[in-house]
Image (cartoon, rainbow, N blue to C red):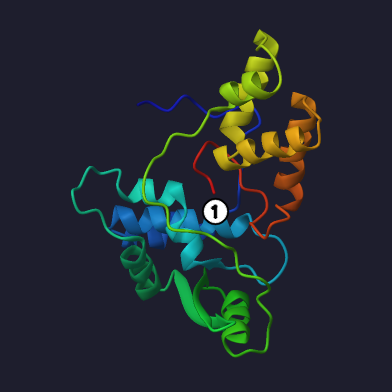
Amino acid sequence: MSFGGFPRRVRSIPVPSPIFGPLLEQIDDLAELKCTLRVIWLLHQKRGYPRFVTLRELLADRTLVRALAADGSHNPPSVERVLARAVERGTLVAGVTEQAGDEERLYVLNSESDRNALAGIVGGNLSAGPMPKAEPWGGDHERPNIFTLYEQNISILSPMIAEELREAEQLYPAAWIEEAFREAVGQNKRSWRYIARILERWEREGRSDGESGGYTKKAGYY
């Protein structure tokens, strides 16, 4: 499948420049590079301080799991194994914290400020806040696409609306789109304008359920 091009409203994120310099020369494992870039992207979607991603989030991340399996290997590397390579290289730093008797492994970029924040969390001197709730993602399952959701919950598609839906499908995760439709229906606000505002708010401010804010792009970014 070929890439269809970047959508009109595509967002960009900052990436530490060593990724495109010395680290690009050093990293000889495609899976490690994919994982590193994905972690950077996920961290950038976080709001507030400190910023970290948990192992559970990464195990539940459809894009990462699928990316690691994309080479067609019968035994693709596990998320944990690839993360261990990135930690060994020094791109990421990991630490373990405990909440209510439940251990969670956290990952941050190997920068001074992030290392200090992680040390504060692990040492109990800095609150990590509520941990994101996520279940490991085990494979593809059928999820109604944005056009089906619109026709089932709002109205018949028009060409103008179809174009807006197509753009939104490129910008937001499938899970966000499905949840936004559900919220709109629950509020009896059955209009695409209302749903689009929900998605824009989540992108800007983050989800209110503890999920990281700002996750955008196509189905699978969650």
Question: Is residue 118 shown above or below 206?
Answer: below
Q: Kindly tell me whether residue 88 is visible in this rendering.
A: yes
Dot 1 crowding, Cα within 10 Å, few <14, some 14–19, many 20+: some
Comparing 150 with 196, the one in front is: 150
The answer to whether 60 appears left or right of 114 in the picture is left
x and y percent of residue 62 in the render? 44, 48
Comparing 171 with 90, the one in front is: 171
Instruction: Residue at 32% x, 55% y: name it.
Output: 31
At mark 1, the secondary structure is helix
Comparing 62 with 28, the one in front is: 62
Comparing 56 with 182, the one in front is: 182
Instruction: Residue at 66% x, 49% y: name it.
Output: 214
Residue type at numbered disc 1: Trp
Instruction: Please name the residue that numbered disc 1 is placed on.
Output: 41
x and y percent of residue 190 in the render? 77, 26
Q: Kindly tell me whether residue 11 is visible in this rendering.
A: no
Instruction: Residue at 56% x, 37% y: name it.
Output: 174
x and y percent of residue 152 in the render? 63, 21
